[in-house]
Each structure stands twice: as C-alpha cells, then as structure tokens.
Amino acid sequence: MKEFWTLLASILGVLAFCQSLLQMMVPPELRFASLKFLNRALNYFSSYCYCDISEIDGVNTNELYKAVQLYLNSFVSASSCSRITLARAIDSSATTFGLSNNDCINDVFNSVALQWEHVVTHRQSQTFSGPPLPHEKRGFTLRIWKRDKDHILDSYLDYIMDKANDIRRKNQERLLYTNSHCRSLDSQGQPWDSVPFKHPSTFDTLAMDPDTKRDIMEDLRNFAAGQALYQQTGGDWKRRYLLYGLPGTGKSSLIAAMASFLGYDIYNLKLTELHSKSEILNLLVKTTSKSIIVIKDIDCLVNLSKRSKVPQAATPQSHDDPGAPVAAHGGENGNDTITFWGRLNFPNGLWSFCGSERIFVYTTNHFEKLDPTLLESSRMDMHICMS
C-alpha cells in the first residue's frame, strides 16, 4: 500500500512539472486556442446540445429566464433534487421552493427527456473608485438531445411561457374593475378603477344543481383550452353567458366562482353611463386578456332603448338588427350613439379581435322581458337559470 501512494505522488509530481513546463513554453494564446478547439471537438461528437438563458439580456431582464424560473419552481418541491432553496414573503404563510445554485433538475416534454441546470457564477465588478464589488451572474442551461432540438425546442419554450403566465395569474391578487368614473382617467391613463377582489365564493361552496354546476365547469374548461380551435376557425376568442333569476338567487356568487375557477379578473361594465361606440371601445381595448366582463340588468337596457326610440317612419333601419332603429343623433359624438343591440354586439368586426380569452356575462332579474332575438345562440352561448 505504501508503494502505491509513493507511485501516485510521483505521477502527480510529473504532471505538475509538465503543466509548469507547458505554461512557460506555450504562449497563452495558443493554449486558449487549443482548449477552444478541444471543446468544439467534444461538442461535435456529443449527443447533446446546450442552450443558455441568462438572467440579463444586455441591460434588460430576460423574460424567458423569469418564465423558466417560475416553471421550474412550480414542481421543484416534488422532484428528486438533493438541495432546494426556500423563501417566504413578508406577511405570507406560503413557502416557495426554488432550484439551488448550480443544481440540476430533469423534465419530460412530449416523451423527450430534458435537463435544466441553474448556473451561478461569481465575478468581481469594477467600480470607478474603491475595491471591486462581488457580482453574481445567473442563468439556466438546458440540455437537450441534438436530434430533438429542431422539432421540440420552440414548442417547449412556448409551453413554459404559457405555464409561467398561468402561475403568475394564480399567484397575483384578483381585481374588480369598474367604469363608474371612466370619463376621468387615472394617473396611468386608464379608464378603469380597480379594487382587490376577495369574494369567497367557489364552485365547491356554491349552492347549485350538481349537473348544472358540472356543465358550467366543463364549458369553462373547454373555453380556456380552446385557443387552437378558435384560431383554426378564425373566430374571436370570447364566450357569452346569460344568468337569469330573481334577486338573491346567486348570480353574483356564480360570477365570483367563475373568476376563481379560471383565475380571471372581473370588469363590471356599466353601459348605462356610456353613450357612444368610442366610449365602449376605449373601455374594452383596455381590458386584459383572461377576464370576465359583466353587464348587469340587461332588461333595464331594453327599457332604456325603448324610451329613447324615435318614430319608426323617420328613423332608418339598423344593420345589426333590422327590427331595431338606429339611435337618434344629438349625443356628444353625433351619429356615433348606439342602440341596445349595438351595446350587446360591440365590439364586432375587426375590433372584436382586440384582446383574447374574454368572457361576457349578462344578468337579468326579469327573463320574460327579454326580446326572443336576444336568446338566440348567435347572441348567447349558454343560458343559466338561477333559482
């Protein structure tokens, strides 16, 4: 055993001498070029390729890095990592998990095995005065088979971005928007006022017929997962629900349960305070995707439209509904004023594609007062009776 250690020490000494000799005889540029050539040769014969995603892209934060971080942190707690990072925000009881520095985690996408590594390197950043400051460079490295890179990389990154957006939406605070003061914009130029929305209603707590509840949840799932279908058919990604029933039957609770189920914000659109298409357009284009737009008491809008009708003989027909007259001029935008049908159908045409994944919910306490034309499937996708 003693002879073995003596032989090993001799070999290490010879290697150290050879390294010192090479450093003295071979120029640094040649050593660097040789190592670079050797690295390229090894990568050429390797079966993997590596994709680096830095935290900072030039001077801006790389959004893909943040998306990958959220995506990996969502399942790192259930993985086989030997070390994970734990964090907890102020006034929060939830613990978040993260991938430790220079640790790896495996993933599978479309039956293809992938590996992520969280790479953190420490550097010294030079300052104009004083000693250099420590600096960390963070990034993720994706290892993927070369044969799978071309046909899976783009779809995999799109999947990560979508998952990260879903995680952000679930983690962020729900908001309730209203246009009660839409004519006066806020400090950011937005026509909506918002407050935190913390309604406790969910489909688990909602008192409702189980079959009806199951049908609504299934319809909402299909809508949220129907992006490819809407793009294939060329339709705008929106859906309309009509909730009707006596006051106190749970229409607002159902809307809150739908928002909680999908993780959507709610926009309470008060059409009675709007008088032109431009006002509605200004509000709707400022709504975010993945939102529920609520229009309450549409039977009152019907009555309002009837009171504002002018004589039929002196009024031209509306293109949206031949039976409904065009509203009279004289609003603040002239003939830009709108009828009841214009309120319900707007936005239409090209404007209907400004925004995606939006749900319109109409409510009424007097179902019998509604025009039968309103109940057609072309105007309302689903009728829900609250009793």
Image (cartoon, grey):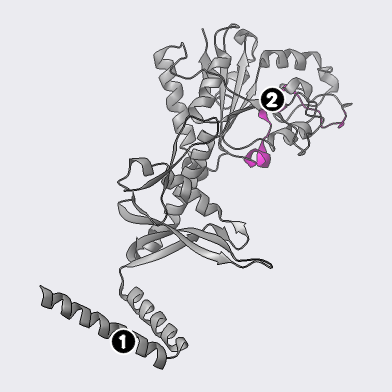
Residue type at mark 1 is Phe
Residue at mark 2: 269
SS under mark 2 = loop
Quarter containing the N terminus? bottom left
Mark 1 or 2, closer to the camera? 1
Magenta stretch containing residue 339, yes or no? Answer: yes
Crowdedness near tag 1: few (<14), some (14–19) or many (≥20) residues, C-alpha within 10 Å: few
The residue sitting at 68% across, 40% down in the picture is: 351
Residue 201 placement (x, y as % from top left): 51, 17
Residue 6 placement (x, y as % from top left): 17, 79
Residue type at mark 2 is Leu
Q: How many marks?
A: 2
Pointer 1 or 2: first along the chain: 1
Q: Nearer the viewer, residue 90 or 334?
A: 90
Residue 148 placement (x, y as % from top left): 34, 61
Asked if residue 29 is positioned above or below residue 170 in the image, the reply reads below
The residue sitting at 61% across, 66% down in the picture is: 131
Find the magenta span and give its range. Answer: 332-354
Q: Is residue 366 left or right of residue 18?
A: right
Residue at mark 1: 17
Residue 50 placement (x, y as % from top left): 40, 65
Q: Nearer the viewer, residue 145 or 168?
A: 168
Asked if residue 82 is positioned above or below residue 176 in the image, the reply reads below
